[in-house]
Amino acid sequence: MEMAISLHDAEVRRRQSADTKAALYLAFLAAVIPVIGALSPTVSDSFRNPVLAIDVVLFAIVLVYVLMAGWYAARATAPSVVNSIGEADLSDVFSEKDIRAATAIKLIDATRLNYPLNNKKITYVRLTQAHIFRAFLAIMLIVAVDWGGDVAAAIFEEAQGTGSVPEKSVCFVTELTSSSGSGALRYRLAEVDYARPCLPLSMGADDNE
Protein backbone atom coordinates (compact mmCIF):
# COMPACT_ATOMS: atom_id res chain seq x y z
CA MET A 1 0.00 0.00 0.00
CA GLU A 2 2.80 2.43 0.87
CA MET A 3 4.62 1.63 -2.37
CA ALA A 4 1.46 2.20 -4.42
CA ILE A 5 0.86 5.58 -2.74
CA SER A 6 4.50 6.59 -3.27
CA LEU A 7 4.41 5.73 -6.98
CA HIS A 8 1.11 7.53 -7.45
CA ASP A 9 2.36 10.70 -5.73
CA ALA A 10 5.57 10.62 -7.78
CA GLU A 11 3.59 10.61 -11.01
CA VAL A 12 1.45 13.50 -9.77
CA ARG A 13 4.59 15.53 -9.02
CA ARG A 14 6.05 14.72 -12.45
CA ARG A 15 2.92 15.98 -14.18
CA GLN A 16 2.77 19.16 -12.10
CA SER A 17 6.46 19.89 -12.71
CA ALA A 18 6.06 19.43 -16.47
CA ASP A 19 3.02 21.72 -16.55
CA THR A 20 4.82 24.42 -14.54
CA LYS A 21 7.94 24.38 -16.72
CA ALA A 22 5.93 24.41 -19.92
CA ALA A 23 3.88 27.40 -18.73
CA LEU A 24 7.06 29.31 -17.82
CA TYR A 25 8.66 28.56 -21.18
CA LEU A 26 5.52 29.60 -23.02
CA ALA A 27 5.40 32.94 -21.19
CA PHE A 28 9.12 33.49 -21.85
CA LEU A 29 8.75 32.77 -25.57
CA ALA A 30 5.71 35.03 -25.84
CA ALA A 31 7.87 37.88 -24.51
CA VAL A 32 10.91 37.04 -26.67
CA ILE A 33 9.22 36.76 -30.07
CA PRO A 34 8.43 40.52 -30.41
CA VAL A 35 12.02 41.37 -29.42
CA ILE A 36 13.43 39.04 -32.07
CA GLY A 37 11.08 40.52 -34.65
CA ALA A 38 12.22 44.05 -33.79
CA LEU A 39 15.92 43.16 -33.96
CA SER A 40 15.76 41.18 -37.17
CA PRO A 41 17.39 42.90 -40.19
CA THR A 42 15.34 43.71 -43.26
CA VAL A 43 15.59 41.47 -46.29
CA SER A 44 15.94 44.46 -48.65
CA ASP A 45 19.25 45.47 -47.06
CA SER A 46 20.68 41.97 -47.42
CA PHE A 47 21.34 42.46 -51.13
CA ARG A 48 23.82 45.26 -50.39
CA ASN A 49 25.78 43.58 -47.60
CA PRO A 50 26.82 39.91 -47.60
CA VAL A 51 27.29 39.90 -43.82
CA LEU A 52 23.77 41.23 -43.38
CA ALA A 53 22.50 38.49 -45.71
CA ILE A 54 23.98 35.90 -43.36
CA ASP A 55 22.29 37.69 -40.44
CA VAL A 56 18.93 37.49 -42.21
CA VAL A 57 19.31 33.73 -42.68
CA LEU A 58 20.40 33.21 -39.07
CA PHE A 59 17.55 35.36 -37.76
CA ALA A 60 15.14 33.24 -39.79
CA ILE A 61 16.60 30.13 -38.18
CA VAL A 62 16.25 31.70 -34.73
CA LEU A 63 12.62 32.56 -35.43
CA VAL A 64 11.90 29.00 -36.56
CA TYR A 65 13.49 27.55 -33.42
CA VAL A 66 11.55 29.93 -31.19
CA LEU A 67 8.26 29.14 -32.92
CA MET A 68 8.89 25.39 -32.63
CA ALA A 69 9.76 25.79 -28.95
CA GLY A 70 6.51 27.68 -28.42
CA TRP A 71 4.55 24.98 -30.23
CA TYR A 72 6.06 22.22 -28.05
CA ALA A 73 5.41 24.27 -24.89
CA ALA A 74 1.79 24.74 -25.94
CA ARG A 75 1.48 20.98 -26.54
CA ALA A 76 2.87 20.32 -23.06
CA THR A 77 0.35 22.66 -21.40
CA ALA A 78 -2.59 21.32 -23.40
CA PRO A 79 -5.28 19.61 -21.29
CA SER A 80 -4.93 15.86 -21.18
CA VAL A 81 -6.52 12.87 -19.51
CA VAL A 82 -5.55 12.25 -15.86
CA ASN A 83 -6.39 8.90 -14.35
CA SER A 84 -7.29 8.90 -10.67
CA ILE A 85 -9.47 7.09 -8.16
CA GLY A 86 -13.08 8.27 -8.16
CA GLU A 87 -16.34 7.45 -6.44
CA ALA A 88 -16.96 4.38 -8.56
CA ASP A 89 -13.52 3.03 -7.71
CA LEU A 90 -14.13 3.57 -4.01
CA SER A 91 -17.43 1.68 -4.27
CA ASP A 92 -15.60 -1.25 -5.83
CA VAL A 93 -12.89 -1.08 -3.20
CA PHE A 94 -15.28 -1.25 -0.24
CA SER A 95 -17.07 -4.19 -1.81
CA GLU A 96 -13.90 -6.26 -1.63
CA LYS A 97 -12.82 -8.30 1.35
CA ASP A 98 -9.29 -6.85 1.49
CA ILE A 99 -9.84 -3.11 1.18
CA ARG A 100 -6.16 -2.17 1.40
CA ALA A 101 -5.14 -4.58 -1.35
CA ALA A 102 -7.98 -3.42 -3.60
CA THR A 103 -7.02 0.24 -3.02
CA ALA A 104 -3.39 -0.50 -3.84
CA ILE A 105 -4.47 -2.16 -7.08
CA LYS A 106 -6.55 0.88 -8.07
CA LEU A 107 -3.65 3.23 -7.32
CA ILE A 108 -1.19 1.12 -9.30
CA ASP A 109 -3.59 0.96 -12.26
CA ALA A 110 -3.99 4.77 -12.24
CA THR A 111 -0.22 5.22 -12.00
CA ARG A 112 0.37 2.80 -14.86
CA LEU A 113 -2.10 4.67 -17.09
CA ASN A 114 -0.67 8.10 -16.20
CA TYR A 115 2.95 7.11 -16.80
CA PRO A 116 2.96 7.34 -20.66
CA LEU A 117 0.88 10.54 -20.56
CA ASN A 118 3.38 12.17 -18.21
CA ASN A 119 6.25 10.95 -20.37
CA LYS A 120 4.71 12.71 -23.35
CA LYS A 121 4.46 15.98 -21.41
CA ILE A 122 8.08 15.70 -20.26
CA THR A 123 9.17 14.97 -23.83
CA TYR A 124 7.50 18.17 -25.04
CA VAL A 125 9.19 20.14 -22.25
CA ARG A 126 12.61 18.74 -23.18
CA LEU A 127 12.02 19.55 -26.84
CA THR A 128 11.13 23.09 -25.81
CA GLN A 129 14.39 23.36 -23.87
CA ALA A 130 16.37 21.97 -26.81
CA HIS A 131 14.91 24.46 -29.30
CA ILE A 132 15.47 27.39 -26.94
CA PHE A 133 19.10 26.31 -26.59
CA ARG A 134 19.46 26.06 -30.39
CA ALA A 135 17.97 29.54 -30.79
CA PHE A 136 20.49 30.83 -28.25
CA LEU A 137 23.35 29.24 -30.19
CA ALA A 138 22.08 30.82 -33.41
CA ILE A 139 21.99 34.24 -31.72
CA MET A 140 25.56 33.74 -30.52
CA LEU A 141 26.51 32.83 -34.09
CA ILE A 142 24.96 36.09 -35.31
CA VAL A 143 27.05 38.02 -32.80
CA ALA A 144 30.17 36.13 -33.90
CA VAL A 145 29.45 36.82 -37.58
CA ASP A 146 28.91 40.53 -36.96
CA TRP A 147 32.04 40.80 -34.83
CA GLY A 148 34.08 38.81 -37.33
CA GLY A 149 32.81 40.94 -40.20
CA ASP A 150 33.76 44.16 -38.40
CA VAL A 151 37.21 42.83 -37.55
CA ALA A 152 37.79 41.61 -41.12
CA ALA A 153 36.68 44.98 -42.54
CA ALA A 154 39.01 46.85 -40.18
CA ILE A 155 41.95 44.60 -41.09
CA PHE A 156 41.23 45.02 -44.81
CA GLU A 157 41.04 48.81 -44.51
CA GLU A 158 44.28 48.84 -42.52
CA ALA A 159 46.00 46.70 -45.14
CA GLN A 160 44.75 48.96 -47.94
CA GLY A 161 45.85 52.09 -46.06
CA THR A 162 42.36 53.60 -45.97
CA GLY A 163 41.63 53.21 -42.33
CA SER A 164 43.69 56.11 -40.92
CA VAL A 165 41.69 59.18 -42.04
CA PRO A 166 38.33 58.65 -43.75
CA GLU A 167 37.31 60.86 -46.64
CA LYS A 168 34.32 62.24 -44.80
CA SER A 169 36.68 63.72 -42.16
CA VAL A 170 38.00 66.34 -44.64
CA CYS A 171 36.20 69.66 -44.11
CA PHE A 172 36.52 73.14 -45.59
CA VAL A 173 39.97 74.64 -45.15
CA THR A 174 40.94 78.27 -44.63
CA GLU A 175 44.54 79.43 -45.19
CA LEU A 176 46.19 82.13 -43.12
CA THR A 177 49.62 83.38 -44.24
CA SER A 178 52.17 84.37 -41.64
CA SER A 179 55.68 85.63 -42.61
CA SER A 180 58.58 84.59 -40.48
CA GLY A 181 62.08 85.44 -41.68
CA SER A 182 62.67 84.57 -45.31
CA GLY A 183 59.93 81.99 -45.67
CA ALA A 184 56.21 81.75 -45.21
CA LEU A 185 54.41 79.23 -42.99
CA ARG A 186 50.84 78.46 -43.79
CA TYR A 187 48.29 77.22 -41.26
CA ARG A 188 45.27 75.30 -42.48
CA LEU A 189 42.34 75.63 -40.07
CA ALA A 190 39.30 73.47 -40.62
CA GLU A 191 36.00 75.27 -40.48
CA VAL A 192 33.64 73.94 -37.84
CA ASP A 193 31.00 71.64 -39.27
CA TYR A 194 28.85 69.89 -36.67
CA ALA A 195 27.01 67.84 -39.27
CA ARG A 196 29.96 65.49 -39.74
CA PRO A 197 33.24 64.73 -37.95
CA CYS A 198 36.36 66.45 -39.26
CA LEU A 199 39.94 67.21 -38.34
CA PRO A 200 39.98 70.31 -36.14
CA LEU A 201 43.43 71.53 -37.24
CA SER A 202 45.98 70.72 -39.91
CA MET A 203 49.34 72.43 -40.49
CA GLY A 204 51.65 72.39 -43.46
CA ALA A 205 54.70 74.25 -44.84
CA ASP A 206 55.11 75.36 -48.45
CA ASP A 207 58.25 73.75 -49.87
CA ASN A 208 58.53 76.33 -52.67
CA GLU A 209 58.84 79.30 -50.30
Image (cartoon, helix red, strand yellow):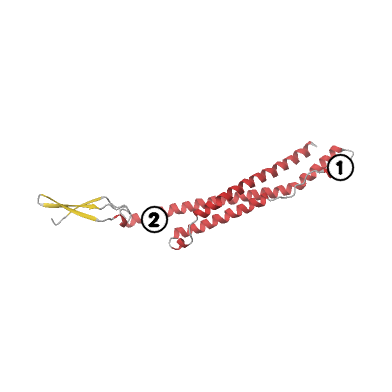
As helix, strand or loop, the secondary structure at mark 2 comes to helix
- Give the labeled residue for mark 2: 153
What amino acid is labelled 2 in the image?
A: Ala
Does any portion of residue 10 appear in the rendered image?
yes
Q: Residue at x 50, y 58 (%)?
A: 56
CA–CA distance between discs 1 and 2? 79 Å
Q: Which residue is mark 1?
A: 91
**Residue 28 image position (x, y, % from top left):** 58, 47
Quadrant holding the C terminus? bottom left
Which element carries disc 1, helix, strand or loop?
helix
Mark 1 burial class by Cα count in 10 Å: few <14, some 14-19, many 20+: few
The residue shown at (77%, 48%) is 113
Spot the residue most to the left.
182
Q: Is residue 161 left or right of residue 121?
A: left
Q: Quadrant of residue 11?
A: top right
Left or right, 27 with reference to 198: right
Q: Nearer the viewer, residue 20 or 62?
A: 20
Q: Residue at x 79, y 42 (%)?
A: 107
Query: Can you give x and y, in whole percent of width and height, for residue 9 in the image?
Result: 74, 40
Residue 180 in the image, given as x and y percentages of width and height: 12, 49
- Counting residues from the start of the chain, the first of labels 1 and 2 encountered is 1
Does any portion of residue 161 appear in the rendered image? no
Badge 1 amino acid: Ser
Residue 40 lies left or right of residue 129; in this view the side is left
Task: Assess disc 2: are there few (<14), some (14-19) or many (≥20) residues with their C-alpha within 10 Å of its C-alpha.
Answer: few
Q: Is residue 95 left or right of residue 115?
A: right
Q: Where's the N terminus, which quadrant?
A: top right
